[in-house]
Image (cartoon, rainbow, N blue to C red):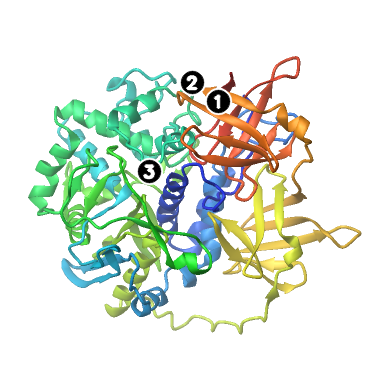
Amino acid sequence: MGVPLQVAPGVGDARVRMSRSLCEEAVGELLANAIAAVGSRRGVMEVSTRLMSASQASVQLGGRVRRALPGRLWRLAWVLILLASVGRDAVADTAVLAELESRDWGGAPGLVYAVKREGETITATAHGLANLELQVALSRDSRMHAGSVAKPFMAYTILRLAEQGQLSLDDGLSDHLDGFEADVSGITLRHLLQHTSGLRDYWSLSALAGRHSGDRHSQAAALALVRRQPELNFPPGSQHLYSNTGYLLLAEIAERVTGQRWDVWLAEQVFEPLGMASSHIVTDPTVVLPGLADSYRRAGDEGAMRHEYRRETLMSGVYGSGNLVTTVDDLLRFAEHLSTAEYDGAPLLAVMSEQGELANGGRVSYGLGLGLGELEGWRTVHHGGAQAGYRAHLLLLPEARLAVAVLANGGHLRAAPVAEALALRALGDAELLDADTDAEPEPEPVLRQAAPTDAAGLYLLDNGAVVKLRVVDGELALLLTGTGHALRCSEPDHCTLAGDVGFVTFQRDSDAAVAGLELRLGDMRTQGQRREPAGLSARELARYAGDYYSPALAAVVTLVVDGEGLRLEQPTGGRVRLTPLTADAFLEWDTGDFIVRFDRDRRGRIRGFAVWLQRAWGVEFERL
């Protein structure tokens, strides 16, 4: 049913109400991993260019499809590029720590972090509150959900079982599990571990079905939803797209092979031997866990609401991909074990750090349960996590014998930049940073003027992507996951992204109005035309209204026309405002991250639509 409109990622606008916490969780997790995955600006651009080179599909909005392949890695490439544009100075700078240490944490959730070098703890600090209602402070012993930091533990489990001959990484998924509606015959366990399986992401599907983080999620229901999907995002091994589904399935496979539930196996084989007494895999979200900090999010992103908080309830019993409760010290114990253990006679961490390879020979910056990157010339392996309002990051610099763990209980806090800043401080204290005394002196900064605010709007690029520019605090910004990245101009209409790694040139028409732009990022250059919402009348919009059912989700949504236009409603209360970009192509205009493409029969009657989300492509709905 059609092909997706490719867009730059963006989730978090206050008006996007459909399972907002789940969307923020998915994006937060992506950012947590992407920030550290690329370490240096050069690494970011290399990864981004490689991803774009693999993105060959394209679509002409409102017209004929030029390629048949649905979906691309454009979103991930775009995230990486923009992270590059932030620049090392803004992301991994010890000023991050100075800001944390000087902040007034009264009445706010916070974070805990610890650093080990050569087996000795050199830093351990806590900021903020574990419980706002009772004013209980966070401490080094505070337990928190670590989200996808559970994935290295899952990968470790599979490797141990492979070492024992109970399975092989090259086993097919169908060798261990059955009952899938999609053709999974080409998927191996290695594909699951390296996020190259093409399986739709469980949490994206759950959000689309109207299930929120505060709703009860069980492992059995998650597996049933995954098995019900009729298609993959892409052929196995052809692309890399982070998917929690793979690790959910790996947990099921491990349980069948061992005859034990994964939380029991992990407690016996990992937690107890390593002295990780505070770590636990949550299979029942109602279990009381002493010392567990509560989870919070900001009430809003502007003004006084930035200093008000709401509880972010987590009722998930889904594990394998997440649901690890732990402490910073326990994470560092595991990191030390990874650094010293062996797998079949080889260093375990080296095995887990082997880059994933695509069918076309391209490589991805992800190994077996670990992201791969670089920090100031030092090789890094890492994983981030985001679940409800919890944020986490585990960062290892193997050659420096350095490990950093960060846990936070506020959804607005970013664990990855803090981890990198801590690592930089530790490297500096140990005199392991290159002083670069022979480097050329930095040129004097060029005075830059603010970008033209009249350029705010949505732009459709000639490669099918959509970018959004918005005025934030009086300055023009490129929107990424709800956060604006300011542009600066050396001359009128010629602007740069921070770090001078990207350039935007605005094009004006005969009336001096901004009509388009040219975007240059690394070796990529593309043109974009400014687009306004298509002017569809209420009568035309009414043709889309009605109830629609998705067999893949076993869920019904309703499209309603009101005074503002078309909106999608879920029975659970979630809503998404849909704006027409062309006839039969709609998107959530403020973020461009929720895409709906309608399908018609031969008589021109609407018979359904498909939705494209970041990690679930082409989910179909039939008109009732």
The amino acid beneath tag 1 is Glu
State yes or no: discs 1 and 2 in contact (Cβ < 8 Å). yes
**Residue 284 vs residue 361, the one in the foreground:** 284
Residue 45 visible in the picture: yes
Decide: few, some or many residues near mark 3? Use Cα within 10 Å; few <14, some 14-19, many ≥20: many
CA separation in Å, label 3 and label 2:
22 Å
Q: Nearer the viewer, residue 30 or 378?
A: 30
- Check the image and report above or below for 315 versus 296: above
Is 369 placed left or right of 461 in the picture? Answer: left
**Contact check, label 3 and label 1, Cβ < 8 Å:** no
Could you tell which of marks 3 and 2 lies nearer the N-terminus? 3
In this figure, which residue is indicated by the disc labeled 1? 620
What kind of residue is marked 3?
A: Ser
Q: Is residue 388 above or below residue 508?
A: above
Q: What kind of element bears circle 1?
A: strand
User: Where, quadrant-wise, is the N terminus in this rendering?
Assistant: top right
Residue ID for mark 2: 551
Q: Earlier in the sequence, mark 3 or mark 1?
A: 3
Left or right, 171 with reference to 74 = left
Q: Residue at x 66, y 81 (%)?
A: 446
